[in-house]
Image: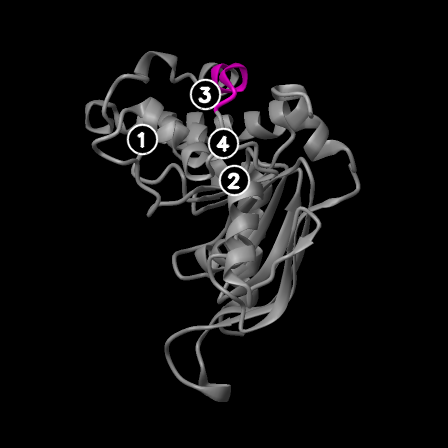
Amino acid sequence: MPPAGRDHLRLQSRENPEGLGVSLESADRCGDVGEGPLAVRALNDVSLAFPRGRFAAILGPSGAGKSAFLHIAGGLDAPTSGSVTVADLKLPFADEEALARIRSEHIGFVFPGENLLPHQTARQNIELPMRLRGEKLDEGWYSSVVRTMGVAGAMDELPARLPRAMQQRVAVARAILGRPAIILADDPAHSLDARASLEIVELLRLCVREFGQTVLMSTQDLAEAALAERVILFSDGGVAGEISEPTPVSILTALEALSLRSGPG
């Protein structure tokens, strides 16, 4: 039986440091408008690879394709063409049962639609993935997650009694409790003030640093994106640029260059 706790998760995620956490190859996703060559593409020929145990931000304006990218990377939507690999497993979009199993075992989601259950305490919400999988809770690992996420004092509270920032901390804890190799976070700091937003992003950095997980986060905020190790710029459903070791200044410079390049010539 494999050892439990933080060291086991780190081993799972980093045993092959050259392995891929997530990759998309020539992924397209047609939207609901138009057909054939006139179809609007939510995702347009995207090929990206993210190594295990790294933090990448997907940056772009509303409608750029960030959410479509995360939905396809997480197996929530099937690409119209192309392929997706998660934790070295090619996603079997034609087999919903197998796909659901991969999502449950390997991917944690922090999505706007993944709200906390209002009539369940914070602890019950965090434990939900384990209950759905019919697995016994590892109390040692649970305590480590709760302590690291800073939610120990909120366990008996219903979500409505918690500040919005604390609700997001609980959501992150729920996403990582099942020891997923991958965490996908779609604008996780939305509607929070600047300080709380950066705290949530710092928690995602902790998931990489402390637990060896791969984190992909979409955002429209330059300060949040600058906390990642890599920034992918999205525009019109495709990759418009990439920044390694980003800073707010380097991101702003890249965005200005992109604006000039796409503007009237």
Q: Which residue is mark 2?
A: 225
Q: Which of the labelled discs sits on residue 135, or is there none?
A: 4
The answer to whether the residue labelled 1 contacts the one labelled 2, judged by CB atoms less than 8 Å apart, is: no
Q: As displayed, is residue 261 above or below residue 141?
A: below
The stretch drawn in magenta includes residue 139: yes
Amino acid type for the residue under numbered disc 3: Met
Q: Do the residues bearing badges 2 and 4 touch, measured as CB atoms within 8 Å?
A: no
Q: Amino acid at mark 1?
A: Asp
Relative side of 7 to 156, left or right: right
Assign the magenta stretch its main secondary structure: helix
Please, is residue 128 above or below residue 58 in the view?
Answer: above
Q: Is residue 216 visible?
A: no
Identify the mark nearer the N-term, 1 or 2.
1
The Cα atoms of the two marked residues, 1 and 4, are separated by 36 Å
Residue type for callout 2: Ala
Identify the element where label 2 is drawn. helix
Q: Nearer the viewer, residue 207 or 217?
A: 207
Q: Would you name the residue on which mark 1 appears?
A: 193
- The region drawn magenta spans 137-143
**How many marks are shown on the rendered structure?**
4
Label placed on residue 149: 3
User: Mark 2 or mark 3, which has the lower sequence index?
Assistant: 3
* Badge 3 vs badge 1, beta-carbon distance below 8 Å: no
